[in-house]
Image (cartoon, helix red, strand yellow):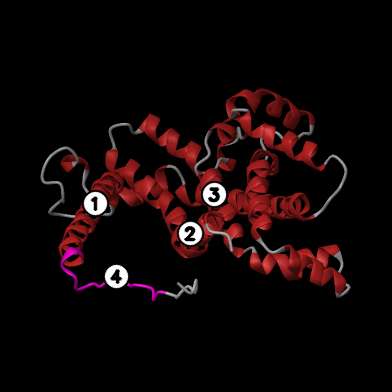
């Protein structure tokens, strides 16, 4: 015995050996079964989610006499319900109110969220964690519990029954959640980029604007979509703060249509169909960035 050890060659599994050949079909059948089950579940979910939207669109294209009769897909289509909804509630002016209020809210919320999120993620200052958790604690308060103090505050500032007051209220209520999203997103970006820019002499705002913001597009898209959906469909604050009918956004006016024309389903569904179009367009336009922003934190490095 010489005591020398010899290196044994690594054995790679032979795909052609009988055991592997017998195991692979079973593995493939199991994978195929999982995929088929997943496809069936997704198909059922798609039908459940799309059916109300399809029913709404088809109902808006019916006449009042054929809403509850006839086949699911009408044999004759008419757009008279769209003309009726447009003129009955002055759809165009309230649509413009919603568009202006939502756009200003999204821009204001995004400005506050990106600046505060960058500060909490990249800067070190006194009471940093305390301020962050104080802002985050406001998310625990339901909107209905804040409506009375916010109403009194807007009244003391002479902003009651104004679009400016409603926009400020929306920005204040949405900024903590948007800040939370942007802080989490900035923390996924490499700190080395910030340090390199500082070494090159860039100021803090220039680092934020020229270095971090171009990389933050997925996070910005996530905030924009969340805030656009929340503001466009908001009802409680708008119905409480705005008292003049001509200044109301679209959602409270749709509620008024429900009260007056509860049996006129074609006009109601026509107004609802027109109201959801901007939401669908925004989501389709930004869905790629939105998905990237939602999944960015799942895999790091």
* Apparent side of residue 113 relative to residue 123 in the rendered image (left or right): left
User: Considering the numbered disc 2 on the image, is that residue within a helix, a strand or a loop?
Assistant: helix
| Alpha carbon distance from label 2 to label 3 | 12 Å
Location of the N terminus by quadrant is bottom left
Tell me which segment is drawn in magenta.
8-19
Mark 1 / mark 4, whichever is N-terminal: 4
Pointer 3 local density, CA inside 10 Å: few below 14, some 14–19, many at least 20: some
Relative to 285, residue 66 above or below: above
Q: Position of residue 80 (x, y in %)?
A: 28, 51
Which residue is painted at 58% across and 36% down in the image? 238
Q: Earlier in the sequence, mark 2 or mark 3?
A: 3
Which residue is the site of mark 2?
Answer: 291
Say which residue label 3 marks: 226
Q: Nearer the viewer, mark 2 or mark 3?
A: 2
Label 4: which residue?
Answer: 13
Precedes in sequence: disc 2 or disc 1:
1
How many neighbours does mark 2 have within 10 angstroms: few (below 14), some (14-19), or many (20 or more)? some
Residue 252 lies in the magenta stretch:
no
| In this rendering, the label closer to the viewer, 1 or 3 | 1
Q: CA distance from mark 1 to mark 4?
A: 39 Å
Relative to 93, 150 lies left or right? right
């Amino acid at each position: 015995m010489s005591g020398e050890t010899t290196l044994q060659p690594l054995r790679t599994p032979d795909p052609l050996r009988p055991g592997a050949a017998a195991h692979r079909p079973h593995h493939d059948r199991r994978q195929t079964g999982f995929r088929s089950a997943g496809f069936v579940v997704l198909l059922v979910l798609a039908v459940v989610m799309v059916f109300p939207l399809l029913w709404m669109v088809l109902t808006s294209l019916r006449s009042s006499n054929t809403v509850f009769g006839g086949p699911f897909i009408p044999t004759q289509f008419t757009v008279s319900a769209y003309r009726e909804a447009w003129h009955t509630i002055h759809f165009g002016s309230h649509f413009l109110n919603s568009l202006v209020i939502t756009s200003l809210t999204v821009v204001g919320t995004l400005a506050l969220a990106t600046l505060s999120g960058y500060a909490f993620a990249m800067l070190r200052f006194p009471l940093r964690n305390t301020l962050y958790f104080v802002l985050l604690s406001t998310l625990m308060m339901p909107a209905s519990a804040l409506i009375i103090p916010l109403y009194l505050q807007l009244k003391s500032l002479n902003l009651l029954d104004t679009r400016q007051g409603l926009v400020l209220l929306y920005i204040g209520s949405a900024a903590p959640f948007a800040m939370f999203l942007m802080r989490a997103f900035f923390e996924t970006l490499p700190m080395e980029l910030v340090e390199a820019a500082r070494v090159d002499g860039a100021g803090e705002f220039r680092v934020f604007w020229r270095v971090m913001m171009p990389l933050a597009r997925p996070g910005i898209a996530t905030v924009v979509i969340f805030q656009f959906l929340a503001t466009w469909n908001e009802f409680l604050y708008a119905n409480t703060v705005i008292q003049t009918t001509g200044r109301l956004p679209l959602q409270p006016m749709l509620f008024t249509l429900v009260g007056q024309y509860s049996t006129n389903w074609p006009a109601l569904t026509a107004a609802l169909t027109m109201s959801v179009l901007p939401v669908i367009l925004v989501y389709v336009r930004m869905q790629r960035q939105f998905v990237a922003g939602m999944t960015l934190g799942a895999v790091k490095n």
